Amino acid sequence: MIRLRPGSVSPKRMAMVQAAGDVAEDELRDTDAQLMWRLRSRDEDALGELYDRHAALAFGLALRMVRDRAAAEEVVQDAFLTLWRQAANYLPDRASCRSWICTIVRSRAIDRLRRSASKESRDGQLAEDLAGLCDTWQLADESLRAQAVHQAVEGLPREQRQVLELAYFLGLSQTEISERTGAPLGTVKGRTRLALQHLRTALFSATQVEEVEP
Amino acid sequence: MSEDGRTPLNCTEVSDLLSAYVLDSLEAGPATQVREHLAVCPDCRAEAAELRSVVAVMAEQVTPVPPPPELRRRVLDAVHAERQVPAAPPTPRSRASRFPWLGVAAALLLAVGGVGWGLEEHLAGAASGPAAASITPVEQLIASGRAQVVPLSPVPGYTGRAALVTAGSRGAYLLLTGVPKLSGERSYTLWFMRTGQPLSSPRAVVEVSGPGAYRLPEGPSGYGAAAVTREPSRSDRTPRGPVLLSSKL
């Protein structure tokens, strides 16, 4: 079994994150927050600015998930429309605008991948995801963050990385992952749990994972 | 065992499923069980928030791809068309703006002959509650105008407030504000009643420890009344504490 216990953030990582935050990301975050605030006032120019800033990541994510340019364009359009509608619920002290957009894009992409799911239930899931999102990476510089995520995911055991990517990018359920990989359902659930715990440890260094014999 | 044959999950079981849940990869049945547990367990909610923050940065693996230039115009045109629908006026950033459902809820409550909730009282309860984070989905439900809000009337002199919020397939919630957080085994318990008698099935009894928004196993339809009591210990199947709030349904 895995037991999590409190640990300490590496001083080096903290210094890097704080330095990046001091010079660039805070300014960017504030500007994003201001744009979101203007969005609440139904300022279409603010949406245009947010689009200019984040559309490439949104389109890249949508394209990787739905693997069709026309479908990805629809996903991005739907996502920014959702951002417009949901702006009143955005709390800048809880999550970055960038994470919000990515969460919305992924939800809308899963809508397309799971056409059998009712739109209403997916809307409810998105609302819960956005409300529960607490993005502690707001202070990190974008390039630092991307690099760290790459390294952390690459550092996962192959089986864990596989289930994580099937769930995240293809929107597969645990049962579907089990069928696709041939691994028993219980094994898939265990790998999913371990993958996120290892990622959390690698990314945030706020907890230490200790393997304990059952 | 619940009425639909499912046993409520404990924290260990939820912990095993939480990663798949936040990835939206859990099947509908277990996902519902996890959601129900999160509604009443602050510790597991905190764990879910941490895991969601990990999921949120997964997108950073993606290589940005410039979308076709015309997509920008299509997005702005769609928003412009949407804008023809009247929107709520913006409010200044304040504690109140973080909980816009409060104003809507207050208006709804007044509209249905409610008990005159004070906005500040709501804010005090909502902001300090252990489940304050879970209020946002409820605020969205109410703001959507598709939620039905049933206030529970307090007994004379009681300052706490509660309401049942029902929004079809999006679930039903208990909102509890203006009440102190309870320690130990004590709980605020919501009972559903038929023919004047509180029911003891797990789906008809909801135990919480303080102010917040809590997802209910099922909506209030089919019951004759609801009441909130303050119970000296959890897992009692009959009410022993005083009735604080109640309403016919």
Image: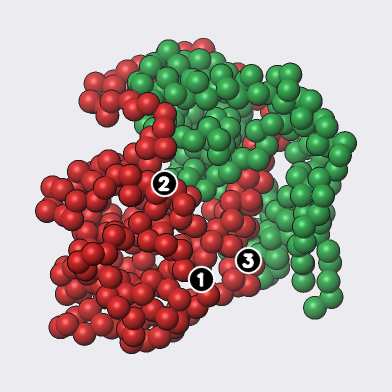
Chain colours: A green, B red
Observer able to see residue A102 = no
Viewer-proximal residue among A179 and B60:
B60
First of labels 2, 1 by sequence position: 2
x then y, percent, for residue A89: 42, 37
Tell me the chain of label 2.
Answer: B
Which type of secondary structure does the marked residue at label 2 adopt?
A: helix
What's the residue at 41%, 46% (across, down)? B136
- Count residues near mark 3 (Cα–Cα under 10 Å), then give few for <14, some for 14-19, many for 20+: some
Give the numbered dot on residue B183: 1
The kind of residue on which mark 1 rests is: Ser
**Looking at the rendering, which quadrant does residue A157 occupy?**
bottom right
Q: Nearer the viewer, residue A140 or B231?
A: B231
- Crowding at dot 2, Cα within 10 Å, few <14 / some 14-19 / many 20+, comes out as many
Residue lying at 75% horizontally and 38% vertically, measured from the top left: A149
Q: In the drawing, does residue B128 fall left or right of residue A165?
A: left
Give me the C-alpha separation between circle 2 and circle 3.
Answer: 23 Å
